[in-house]
Image (cartoon, helix red, strand yellow):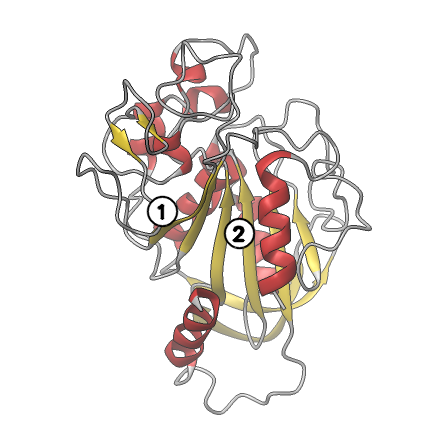
Amino acid sequence: MKRVLAAALSTLAAASVFAFAPEAGATNYSLWIHGRNTSGLGAQGNYADFAYWGPSSYSAGVNKKSVNWGGVDRISPSNYRVRDALDCFCTGSNWCYIAAHSAGDAQIGYTLAMYGGSSRYKKNAVANSSGVCGNVDGTTQVGWNIKWIDVAAGAGGGSELADAGEWFVSDNLTADLVTTTTRALYNHNTTRSKWLYRFAGASGTLYSGLLPGQDDEVVSYHAAGGVSGTSGGSFCNPGDWFCDGDLYTGSNGTSSGRPLWSYQTVDFRDDGESYNHYTNGSWGGIVGKVRADMVTYAY
């Protein structure tokens, strides 16, 4: 029901824009935006390279494309890769479903907040070797045609692993993933009315002393669940002790009264503590739940 409603709202919102546009040639795409990527998996600008995620033969939504932005640089200077992909496949008569993992959450959030109201040239969905597509007719539109966004283990609220310096690496992205930094990087409430459906894993054990509340070994529920505020918090599954409150499913926030950011909903909360953060080269962990969702609803 939620996907039908979101798609209907997107269609109604765009009705005036495309009232005189021909239906022929309209195509839907599924864009996958990866997270922190110290292994260098996925060639930047190559929308067919799914090395970060798993075998490219797996179904992952209609006309799937991999948005490879690097994964070690700070959000702002690397964000053009995400904008290039959205320009390519989500303008003109084409529409997109988005799936994001980990720091990919911050990438799409930053994109919408900072550039979602900008003028974009309508593109032909034919990319060159740099991942840039050609113009259709030289006309522009405001923002991108996005139906909705699935987020697996979202790090848009940062990670305490970055706060504590647990990642002993030199990549610049870690500085952006400090919880207070990520939360101040852009206005998380500005999604241009695009809904983010969040999937939060809870099988974390390795860093349980550093990550507050329920976690998937990299991000806690406050980030994965889209809980608002300038800092994180300790949120858990119902019945767990020593937490600031439960993370509710849906858009109701937490039992302690902390709301989610606007246009956010917790689609899946890992009550069974079965899903971790990692894809393991096979669409694994909480990403597997999002892949199944994309296969069902992104068509």
The x, y position of residue 179, in whole percent, is 34, 24
Locate the C terminus and report the quarter of the image it occupies: bottom right
Q: In the image, is 23 to the left or to the right of 282?
A: left
Q: Residues within 10 Å of mark 2 (few under 14, many from 20)?
A: many
Q: In the image, is 207 to the left or to the right of 169?
A: left
The x, y position of residue 218, in whole percent, is 50, 23
Query: Which type of secondary structure does the marked residue at label 1 adopt?
Result: loop
Which residue has dot 1 on it? Answer: 249
Q: Please identify the quarter of the rendering in which residue 52 is found.
A: top right
Asked whether disc 2 touches disc 1, contact meaning CB atoms under 8 Å apart, the reply is no
The number of numbered discs placed on residues in the rendered structure image is 2
Which residue has dot 2 on it? Answer: 83
The x, y position of residue 236, in whole percent, is 35, 29
Question: Tag 1: residue type?
Answer: Thr
Q: Please identify the quarter of the rendering in which residue 165 is found.
A: top left
Write the residue at 39% across / 74% down. 9
Q: In the image, is 32 to the left or to the right of 43?
A: left
Q: In the rendering, which numbered label is found on residue 125?
A: none
Q: Where is 3 relative to 22, above or below?
A: above
Write the residue at 18% across / 34% down. 256
Residue furthest to the front: 239
Instruction: Name which of mark 2 and mark 1 comes first in the sequence.
Output: 2
Write the residue at 62% across / 62% down. 296
Question: Tag 2: residue type?
Answer: Arg
Return the residue nearer the eye: 93 or 265.
265
